[in-house]
RNA sequence: GCCCGAGUGGUGGAAUAGGUAGACACAAAGGACUUAAAAUCCUUUGGCAGUUAUGCCGUGCCGGUUCAAGUCCGGCCCCGGGCACCA
């Protein structure tokens, strides 16, 4: 028999599907396991990053199936998004057509991988049956005050023609197209994610199954600061200035006040004064700078307003400046400057020659006249009236209490997190179900009128929002029945992915977003697998949605994903030619470019990317090696969280291994089909040796899969196969053959999560019925794995000098005796005094001599 | 600047709780089978010295703790990632 993977893989993919082997249904008597991989955007083709993601998730899901769990393992399509609209413009193909064609192609690619998905639950978010419920949720959120519209400065990407959320701006550039993002004042829809800032932060301690890295990134993004709001009176005016400070303990050192250029008081204070002309110029100059330039410009600049405010504790008049480094959208947009203890304020004070007063000093060490940088450490208060001598940590609350009693301050917390802007001025997204009526204002569409469908005959020119078309916009007001205009913004595509894992629980439910009971049974997701690029986007939004749905009574849990595995990227080396930049490997001949003949530099190993010409095509590889060999390589090359470096010869090696397994089982097909029963317990001699290897392999593979060390699990199977290749020539007694038969049966099962087609085929060849994919995972007996004789290393002064084969239960005295008889050990302790002997049972003896 | 993660043979990577560093694989070299090739099988493969026995060195660098350190502690270097005028 030949390992005909093409025929065999197609055969089992068909059988799994026909027999609905992986379809899930609620069973209260079984422990559930919800395994989920991040659903793909239907870009057209599966790439190796997808392949690895799904291979990892599938190995975990298949293992859980075999461990007796009721497994939910669904897949779908994150189908809205801008590329579909760009394709419509370029290829004159409707976004829906383009998207559904891509889904069809990618679905067949996924089928070729042989994944254990419940395909009956497949969803596409661009399907009205899906986004209808999103529209309903949007209205419910609006009713709950969690969705609102406001005029604000937003991130605008000219090339995408739409607004972006803060999370979608990378260093001032669009996360999708890389163009510069500008600020634009627009009426926009927001979700009030900031209502959940504290809970999003606090609940992270209930996520021990998440990588610390992702939690840290979310923590930074939320950016909680504990401090106080302190109010300063303005000299000779009625207005007051409230600042936010994390260092109220330094208030006695606040020697000037800073306002953001956009702060309303900035203009008010200079109005109709001699400072007005220059001040307005200053404000204009700063606020006209792009967000990017403003954040990168570290030079401190300010403008004196001519006004003073009163430090509530020192009662001093301190000057009010407008400063370029004060952010308008953090805290209150105003800052009390403490130059002695803040680096930025120190720089500012030096430039504008403002007083610097030390108020914190560890044991009186800090001397004002010698200060050449801000002191930001801790210490006791000085120059602070009755607080002098108090450690600054204690002074924080004491000072806030005093301010509170004066009515000039209170404890306060600031977050960096802003509300989520969800309006997008694009066609291919979920329409926001609201209308504008001159009489009634903003009115939600009636629930019975949902879904608001996307008009099919929109025109895609690339300019403007395609939804700005008369027949879509013109409507009647749901409240008064008068003429009204429909909202033309659609939702950010991250809204769809914020709740799709819940829709999978009851994908055809037609009375709401999802069936509460199904979601209560299946959720939350036990294991989520995906890329780290969503650390603060999708993974934060989904957590927010779960909490919102919980508060609306849909769910009883707080978090969507109990455990998260962020898989590493698939990388490959790049080649660059001086004339053509990135080269395809086929254009590199003997280190030279085959087009221009110049020397080629072998670039870094980088994430596979079409533009860098270092991608490999999963379809071609599936043709050449089959899904099982490719899955093996994508799991074996590196642990799942780590990036993997593509290696053609590595894939070939895994292909050879698949063949090796096939030949091994094939050579013993007679034994497997014979009446001889597999041995159930070792009977001494060779049979015990075979049992030892079998059960050690089961033990190791089981433990490694449980801790997601899939690479070492596969290595353990390889070792097992190597051992069986030797054993197959040493089978003399019937017991040996029975043990070998049992070993082969275990081998087929151990391989099932990694090479499912091969396992099913060998299982059938071996004369068994039923799907091995749904059989019980092999169990092990630990005592079978233990050797009677163990190898004990003998160290003399920390260096291994001998290895002794001794009974595993040998006493320390026996081991010492044997060691002292060993000639090499003798040579190293001869003439010396034994000071110490340490024995680690059945492992090592350490002798110390002097 | 701050916060994470990492640094191990020619290469990808093992070493789960401080106990024989280099499992498993790739690559390379040699050999068997073959008219030949492919496939397969066997052997060698961290470095240095040595005919062997064996000895010394070796997990980014320097130091420490320990009978014993890839693993723990202190101080660096370099790489990857995230955050960054957040008061």
Image (cartoon, rainbow, N blue to C red):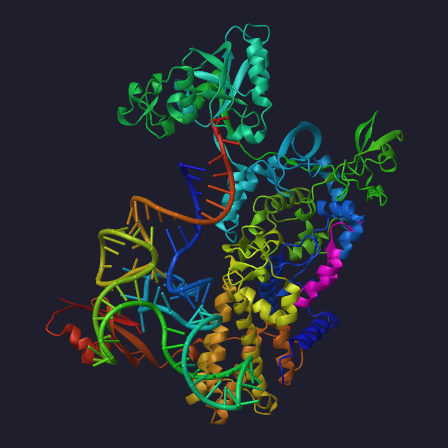
Residue closest to the eye, A634 or A32: A634
Query: Residue A272 occupies which quadrant of the picture?
Result: top right
Q: Residue furthest front?
A: A597
Residue at the image position 54 percent from the left and 43 percent from the top = A218
Q: Visible in this render: residue A24? A: no
Q: Residue furthest left?
A: A831
Q: Visible in this render: residue A253? A: yes
Is residue A52 depicted above or below A370 in this figure?
below
Residue A383 position within the rendered picture, expressed as x and y whole percent measured from the top left: 33, 17
Residue at the image position 28 percent from the left and 71 percent from the top = A844
Q: Tell me the quadrant of the picture where the N terminus of chain A can be found.
A: bottom right
Locate residue A352 relative to residue A436 in the image: left or right.
left
Residue A790 position within the rendered picture, expressed as x and y whole percent measured from the top left: 33, 78
Locate residue B44 relative to residue A508 in the image: left or right.
left
Residue A640 position within the rendered picture, expressed as x and y whole percent measured from the top left: 52, 60
Q: Is residue A644 magenta?
A: no
Q: Is residue A108 magenta?
A: yes
Query: Residue A759 occupies which quadrant of the picture?
Result: bottom right
Residue closest to the eye, A549 or A164: A164
Please report the bounds of the magenta region as a residue range.
A102-129
Q: How many marks?
A: 0
Is residue A404 depicted above or below A632 in this figure?
above
């Amino acid at each position: 028999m030949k390992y005909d993977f093409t025929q065999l893989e197609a055969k089992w993919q068909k059988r799994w599907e026909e027999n609905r082997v992986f379809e899930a249904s609620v069973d209260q008597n079984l422990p559930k396991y919800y395994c989920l991989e991040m659903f793909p955007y239907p870009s057209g083709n599966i790439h190796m990053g997808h392949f690895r993601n799904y291979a990892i998730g599938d190995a975990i899901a298949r293992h859980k199936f075999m461990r007796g769990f009721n497994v939910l393992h669904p897949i779908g399509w994150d189908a809205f998004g801008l590329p579909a609209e760009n394709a419509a413009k370029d290829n004159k193909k409707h976004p829906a057509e383009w998207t559904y064609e891509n889904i069809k192609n990618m679905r067949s690619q996924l089928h070729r991988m042989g994944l254990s998905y419940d395909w009956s639950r497949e969803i596409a978010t661009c399907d009205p049956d899906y986004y209808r419920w999103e529209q309903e949720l949007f209205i419910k959120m609006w009713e709950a005050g969690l969705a609102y519209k406001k005029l604000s400065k937003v991130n605008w990407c000219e090339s995408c023609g739409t607004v972006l959320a803060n999370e979608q701006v990378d260093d001032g550039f669009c996360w999708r197209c890389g163009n510069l993002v500008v600020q634009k004042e627009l009426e926009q829809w927001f979700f009030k994610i900031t209502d959940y800032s504290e809970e999003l932060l606090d609940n992270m301690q209930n996520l021990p199954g998440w990588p610390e890295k992702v939690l840290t990134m979310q923590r930074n993004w939320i950016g909680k600061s504990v401090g106080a709001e302190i109010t300063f009176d303005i000299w000779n005016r009625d207005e007051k200035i409230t600042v936010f400070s994390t260092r109220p303990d330094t208030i006695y050192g606040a020697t000037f006040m800073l306002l953001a250029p956009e702060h309303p008081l900035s203009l008010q204070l200079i109005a109709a004064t001699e400072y007005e002309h220059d001040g307005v110029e200053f404000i204009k100059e700063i606020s006209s700078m792009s967000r990017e330039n403003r954040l990168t410009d570290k030079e401190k600049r300010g403008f004196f307003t001519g006004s003073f405010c009163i430090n509530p504790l020192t009662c001093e008049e301190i000057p009010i400046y407008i400063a370029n480094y004060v952010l308008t959208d953090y805290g209150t947009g105003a800052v009390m400057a403490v130059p002695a203890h803040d680096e930025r304020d120190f720089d500012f004070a030096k430039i504008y020659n403002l007083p610097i007063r030390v108020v914190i000093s560890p044991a009186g060490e800090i001397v004002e006249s010698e200060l050449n940088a801000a002191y930001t450490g801790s210490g006791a208060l000085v120059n602070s009236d009755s607080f002098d001598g108090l450690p600054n940590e204690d002074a924080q609350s004491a000072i806030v209490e005093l301010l509170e009693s004066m009515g000039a301050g209170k404890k306060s917390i600031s977050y960096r997190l802003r509300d989520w802007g969800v309006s997008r001025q694009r066609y291919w997204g979920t329409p926001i179900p609201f209308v504008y009526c001159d009489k009634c204002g903003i009115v939600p569409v009636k629930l019975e009128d949902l879904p608001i469908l996307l008009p099919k005959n929109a025109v895609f020119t690339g300019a403007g929002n395609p939804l700005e078309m008369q027949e879509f916009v013109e409507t009647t007001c749901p409240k008064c029945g008068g003429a009204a205009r429909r909202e033309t913004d659609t939702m950010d595509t991250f809204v769809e992915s914020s709740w799709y894992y819940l829709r999978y629980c009851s994908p055809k439910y037609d009375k709401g977003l999802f069936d509460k009971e199904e979601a209560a049974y299946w959720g939350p997701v036990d294991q989520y697998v995906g890329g780290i690029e969503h650390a603060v986007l999708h993974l934060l939004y989904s957590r927010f949605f779960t909490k919102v749905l919980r508060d609306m009574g849909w769910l009883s849990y707080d978090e969507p994903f109990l455990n998260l595995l962020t898989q590493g990227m698939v990388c490959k080396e790049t080649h660059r030619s001086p004339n053509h930049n990135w080269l395809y490997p086929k254009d590199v001949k003997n280190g030279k470019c085959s087009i221009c003949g110049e020397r080629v530099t072998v670039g870094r190993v980088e994430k596979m990317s079409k533009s860098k010409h270092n991608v490999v095509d999963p379809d071609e590889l599936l043709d050449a090696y089959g899904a099982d060999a490719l899955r093996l390589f994508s799991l074996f090359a590196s642990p799942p969280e780590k990036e993997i470096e593509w290696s053609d010869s590595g894939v070939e090696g895994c292909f050879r291994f698949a063949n090796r397994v096939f030949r091994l089982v094939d050579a013993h097909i007679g034994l497997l089909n014979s009446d001889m029963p597999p041995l159930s317990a070792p009977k001494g001699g060779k049979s015990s040796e075979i049992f030892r290897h079998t059960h050690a392999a089961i033990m190791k593979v089981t433990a490694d899969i449980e801790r997601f060390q899939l690479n070492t699990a596969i290595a353990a199977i390889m070792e097992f196969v190597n051992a069986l290749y030797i054993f197959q020539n040493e089978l003399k007694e019937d017991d040996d053959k029975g043990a070998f038969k049992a070993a082969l049966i275990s081998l087929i099962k151990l391989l099932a999560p990694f090479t499912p087609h091969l396992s099913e085929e060998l299982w059938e060849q071996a004369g068994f019925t039923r799907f091995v994919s749904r059989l019980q995972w092999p169990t092990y007996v630990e005592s079978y794995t233990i050797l009677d004789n163990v190898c004990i290393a003998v160290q003399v002064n920390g260096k291994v000098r001998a290895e002794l084969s001794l009974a595993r239960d040998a006493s320390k005295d026996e081991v010492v005796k044997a060691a002292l008889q060993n000639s090499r050990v003798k040579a190293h302790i001869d003439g010396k005094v034994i000071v110490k002997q340490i024995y680690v049972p059945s492992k090592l003896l350490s002798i110390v001599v002097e």
